Structure formats: structure tokens, C-alpha cells
Image (cartoon, rainbow, N blue to C red):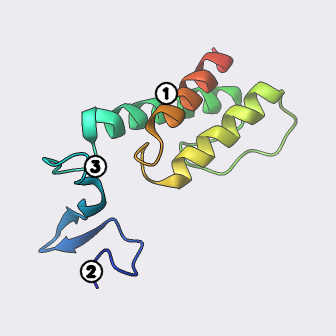
């Protein structure tokens, strides 16, 4: 099985191109061609980049997507780091719960500014 069925894969490689498995989305989004519905994934990627820059500036990360730097941090910095990691590791870029993910990242950014 390339995608779907008993696989958790949301897409598959076909001739070096990722083909999204959008079958589960088609009942509400009949014309879907990618998971970036309404540019949600693009927006979440931008929010993740912005939050990563703030976390690096705060000293809790050395690089985007990197491990946390051991230390003592305020609850705002530590919480923002956990929110960043959760959204990053979900790997859906907001597809699973776009309103929540965008609010979580936006609030984390505001807390660090």
C-alpha cells in the first residue's frame, strides 16, 4: 500500500513527486489538490519560522527545529518552546487542527515579543 488503507502515510512518492492522499478530505473539499487549503500550511510554516527565530533569540534553541538548550527559562519561553515543538513534530503544518495551531503559535509569538 503506497498510502491510505492501514498506512498512516498522507502521501506517496510517484516518479520522484509527492502525491497527496486527499481521499479523507474530499467529502468537504471536493476540489482539493493539496493539503495547503486556504494557504493554512504556508501560514503555519511562516509562524513556525517566526517563533523559531524568537526562541533562538531567547537562547532556548541554537537552530530552528533543534534541541532545547539546557537552562532556566521563564514560563513564557519554556511554554513557547513546548508549543513550537508540538506543532513542528505534528508534521501536518496545521492540517489536523488549523485554528488551534495558528492560535497557539500566534500566542506564543506574542508572549515572546
Q: CA distance from mark 1 to mark 2?
A: 34 Å
Q: CA distance from mark 2 to mark 3?
A: 17 Å
**Residue tagged by mark 2?**
2
- Image x and y of residue 44, in percent: 42, 35
The residue lying at 42 percent from left, 72 percent from top is 8
Left or right side of 64 for 35: left
Q: Earlier in the sequence, mark 3 or mark 1?
A: 3
The residue lying at 74 percent from left, 29 percent from top is 77
Q: Secondary structure at mark 3?
A: loop
- Image x and y of residue 105, in percent: 55, 30
Q: Residue furthest front?
A: 27
Disc 1, disc 2: CB below 8 Å? no
The residue lying at 15 percent from left, 74 percent from top is 14
Above or below 82: residue 24: below
- Indicate the quadrant containing the C terminus: top left, top right, bottom left or bottom right: top right
**Residue tagged by mark 3?**
35
Closer to the eye: label 3 or 1: 3
**Residue tagged by mark 1?**
50
Q: Secondary structure at mark 2?
A: loop
Q: CA distance from mark 3 to mark 1?
A: 21 Å
- Image x and y of residue 85, in percent: 61, 46
Q: Which mark is residue 103?
A: none
Closer to the eye: label 1 or 2: 2
Q: Secondary structure at mark 1?
A: helix
Mark 2 surroundings within 10 Å by alpha-carbon count, few (fewer than 14), some (14 through 19), many (20 or more)? some
Amino acid at each position: 500500500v503506497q498510502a491510505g488503507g492501514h498506512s498512516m502515510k498522507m502521501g506517496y512518492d510517484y516518479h520522484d513527486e509527492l502525491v497527496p492522499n486527499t481521499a479523507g478530505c474530499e467529502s468537504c473539499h471536493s476540489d482539493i489538490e493539496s493539503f495547503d487549503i486556504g494557504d493554512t500550511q504556508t501560514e503555519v510554516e511562516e509562524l513556525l519560522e517566526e517563533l523559531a527565530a524568537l526562541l533562538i533569540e531567547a537562547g532556548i534553541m541554537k537552530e530552528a527545529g533543534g534541541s532545547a538548550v539546557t537552562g532556566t527559562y521563564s514560563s513564557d519561553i519554556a511554554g513557547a518552546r513546548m508549543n513550537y515543538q508540538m506543532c513542528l513534530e505534528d508534521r501536518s503544518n496545521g492540517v489536523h487542527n488549523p485554528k488551534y495551531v495558528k492560535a497557539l503559535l500566534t500566542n506564543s509569538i506574542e508572549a515572546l515579543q
